[in-house]
Image (cartoon, grey):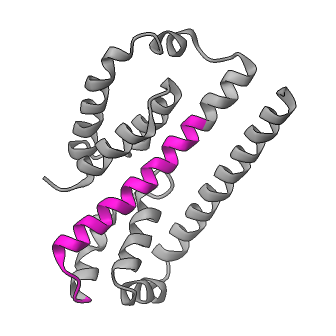
């Protein structure tokens, strides 16, 4: 039993490392190559989605996806659909950070190194409303990477659905 859980943990860590390395490589490649930017722009909403996922994981390279909006508008995309597409892509990128934190929680549980304050948080689930509301406000108004908050929330053991919902509505411009 312990062996299979360690194997599962190792596979999760490897999968996340591959995703992070891929996003890191793509973000550097895209931002340094105008031809790639032009090609992605020609893909329309799919290109906007790809750019927003890559730039949304902004612990790597902090270039906001919204900075590409004029490029996509000049390609003839509709602003409301572009906003929805970029918000969705950025939410997915932030959820990658969430799953990095969740994997870290699993790794710490396996070694019994989970700090006591995280273990005690599980007993006080009454704070979730305020935590999720705070995450919404943070993602809507604070110009820092959402991963700075999302990864610790995953370590605390919050569920993915409320976190992703809060991020999605927080990413949508007010």
User: Is there any visible trace of residue 21 in the rendered image?
Assistant: yes
Comparing 109 with 142, the one in front is 109
Residue 122, magenta (yes or no): no
Residue 49 point in image, percent of width and height = 39, 71
Q: Which residue occupies 24% across, 32% down?
A: 133
Residue 142 point in image, percent of width and height = 25, 42
Q: Relative to residue 16, is residue 101 depicted above or below? A: above
Residue 5 point in image, percent of width and height = 78, 33
Q: Relative to residue 53, is residue 133 depicted above or below? A: above
Numbered-mark total: 0
Question: Which range of residues does the magenta coloring cover?
Answer: 75-102
Q: Which residue occupies 23% across, 67% down?
A: 83
Q: Relative to residue 38, is residue 110 depicted above or below? A: above
Q: Main secondary structure of the magenta part?
A: helix
User: Is residue 65 rendered to the left or right of residue 21?
Assistant: left
Q: Relative to residue 137, is residue 18 depicted above or below? A: below
Residue 97, magenta (yes or no): yes
Q: Which residue occupies 38% across, 53% down?
A: 91
């Amino acid at each position: 039993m312990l062996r299979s859980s360690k194997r599962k943990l190792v596979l999760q860590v490897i999968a996340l490392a591959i995703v992070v390395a891929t996003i890191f490589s793509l973000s550097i490649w895209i931002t340094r190559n105008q031809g790639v930017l032009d090609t992605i722009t020609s893909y329309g909403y799919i290109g906007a989605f790809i750019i927003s996922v890559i730039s949304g994981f902004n612990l790597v390279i902090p270039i906001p996806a919204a900075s590409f909006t004029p490029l996509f508008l000049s390609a003839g995309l509709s602003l409301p659909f572009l906003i929805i597409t970029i918000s969705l892509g950025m939410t997915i990128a932030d959820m990658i950070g969430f799953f990095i934190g969740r994997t870290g929680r699993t790794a710490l549980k396996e070694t019994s190194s989970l700090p006591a304050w995280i273990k005690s948080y599980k007993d006080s689930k009454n704070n979730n409303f305020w935590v999720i509301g705070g995450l919404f406000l943070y993602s809507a108004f604070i110009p820092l990477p959402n991963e700075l908050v999302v990864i610790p929330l995953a370590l605390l053991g919050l569920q993915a659905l409320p976190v992703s919902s809060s991020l999605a509505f927080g990413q949508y411009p007010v």
